[in-house]
Image (cartoon, grey):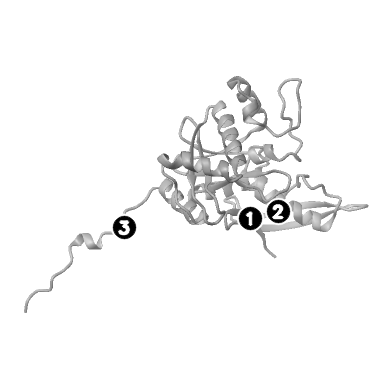
Amino acid sequence: MPSPILPSSSSFSPPPQIDAAQALDQKVETLLRGRYVSAAAETFVEDYLKDNHFEALLVHTRELALLAEAQGFDVSLRFCTSKELGHPVPLLTIRTQDGEYAVPSINQVWDPVIPLERGIGESKEKQTLAAEEVEDSEMQAKLGSSVLAFETFAKGRPVQVAIIPSDSSEVSVQALPFFSEGALDDARQHAAERIVEGASSYSYILDEVVCPAVRECIREESALFGKRERPELVDAGTDGKGSIFECITYVPMAESTDELPIRGVVYQDGLSLKMRFLS
């Protein structure tokens, strides 16, 4: 009886492992429902954005890149097509000189309602930054360092920052970080550490996901809480890794201040990270 013809061992080889950066590229393409644009086509993409009323994306992308570079970061720009949004999306990768990835607090700078001190020296004008008006590199560095904070992630934890139209009437664009799985774990942990230890370093998840969600909960109970007021959070069992955020916050009432227990998780919802409250 003849021996069966067996496939070569290579047919059973496991698929090649991809690194974290490649995995993040795939995640971004899946979320945006698009493909990264080749470097040769980037000029055509920029022309498309300008001709179709998306020039604000390019202006704010350049502004963020200039401010980050002025503070010593390495910045690279790519574009990804997007069926989800209906237009190409600029994505910045911001890295320290040591190769760590960074997420900037630029949304807090671009939001004209948040009363940041955006001037230098005696000038304290509260206005949105405009990169075209800041030509001097030393001035860019001073201005950027006075308003921008960065959350950093290790070399093997890549993050990309997309610049997309905002759904807010108060600002035209927003920066939306896309985290690799490792970076997302770290981002949750950074937020938990801020709550548990009371550190002051910038955390995207705490500052731009958890606090806005908690703020809305407070405002549902009392209109006395300001639209941009920062909630006070007291740890009540938050997991150190950030799998569960459990806190006490406070609701200002007409004649008293009430405690409001908060318990929730941060999860990916479409393009954005959101907080889901648990009973």
Q: Is residue 188 visible?
A: yes
| Residue that numbered label 2 is attached to | 213
Query: Circles 1 and 2: CB distance less than 8 Å?
Result: yes
Secondary structure of the residue carrying tag 3 is: loop
258 relative to 169 in the view: left or right = right
- Please name whichever residue, 21 or 127, is drawn nearer the observer in this view of the structure: 127
The extreme bottom residue here reads 1
Looking at marks 3 and 2 on the same chain, the residue that comes earlier in the sequence is marked by: 3
Looking at marks 1 and 2 on the same chain, the residue that comes earlier in the sequence is marked by: 2
Amino acid at dot 3: Pro
**What residue do we see at 63% from left, 21% from top?**
139
209 relative to 250 in the view: left or right = left
Cα distance between the residues tagged 1 and 2: 8 Å
Q: Quadrant of the C terminus?
A: bottom right
**What residue do we see at 63% from left, 57% from top?**
265
Up/down of 197 relative to 32, above or below: above
| Residue that numbered label 1 is attached to | 274
The extreme left residue here reads 1
Secondary structure of the residue carrying tag 1 is: strand
Q: Where's residue 57, x and y in %?
A: 59, 41
Amino acid at dot 1: Lys
Q: Where's residue 112, x and y in %?
A: 74, 39
Query: Circles 3 and 1: CB distance less than 8 Å?
Result: no
37 relative to 9 in the view: left or right = right
Disc 2 residue crowd, few under 14, some 14–19, many 20+, Cα 10 Å: some
Disc 3 residue crowd, few under 14, some 14–19, many 20+, Cα 10 Å: few
Q: Where's residue 38, x and y in %?
A: 41, 43
Disc 1 residue crowd, few under 14, some 14–19, many 20+, Cα 10 Å: some
Q: Is residue 91 visible?
A: no
| Residue that numbered label 3 is attached to | 15
Up/down of 5 relative to 167, above or below: below
